[in-house]
Amino acid sequence: MSDLESAASEVETVKPVPNQHRKIMTAVFIVISIPLAVVIAGIVTTWWRPVTLLMLCPAMKLMGYSKMAEPLAVRAVELYVHSDGLNSKSTMNALWNLGQVYSDNGKAAKAEQVFRAIAIYNSKKPKDGAVMPYQVLRAWSKTLRTLGRTREAERVEAQLEHTSSLKSL
């Protein structure tokens, strides 16, 4: 026997145990997958709750993610229309949020349609049933001016002044 062969026979060869390697990989997978599953579950549940979506939109707008807030605002409106109908106060609140997002994203034509729809809803509801009547009229007027529709904006502003004077009585 050569020196090399005798030295090799004395040294134990360490072979990785397949079970041990599998256990380590399983542990790593679990450690990574649990937070991922929580995030996915949170996204899924948020996507189906319009109240949560409505709370996320203003926060996203404040953080500068207005473009990302738009699909959330659209989804909130869809969910409220489906559950409460088109002419409900909760749907109109969701529309107000969507109009603000459209306005922030430079989509004045879409924002104008939304603000007009809310103003029409408000005109048919008593004071307690209206959705932010002054803010809606102000936003609608501003959007009309952005679109270059000054005469319509002046009419809305006159309506706003009339509404404000009635409140002070």
Image: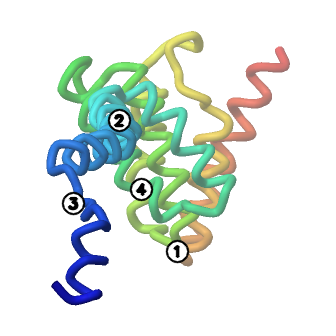
Q: Nearer the viewer, residue 1 or 14?
A: 1
Numbered tag placed on residue 70 in the rendering = 4
Question: Which circle's residue, 1 or 2, is located before the other in the chain?
Answer: 2
- Image coords of residue 124 (percent x, y): 41, 22
- The residue where tag 2 is placed is 34
Left or right of 91? Residue 5 is left
Q: CA distance from mark 1 to mark 4?
A: 20 Å
**Rendered residue at 21%/89% (across/down):** 2
Residue receiving disc 1: 147
Q: Earlier in the sequence, mark 3 or mark 1?
A: 3
Comparing 61 with 109, the one in front is 61
SS for dot 2: helix
Label located before the other in sequence (2 or 3):
3
Sort mark 4 into few (<14), some (14-19) or many (20+) by Cα contacts within 10 Å.
many
Mark nearer the viewer, 1 or 4: 4
Please tell me whether mark 1 sits on a helix, a strand or a loop: loop
Residue 24 is left or right of residue 62, and the answer is left
Instruction: Give the label on residue 41, or none.
Output: none
CA gap between label 1 and label 2 equals 49 Å
Q: Inspect the image, locate mark 1, and give the three-letter code of the amino acid beneath it.
A: Leu
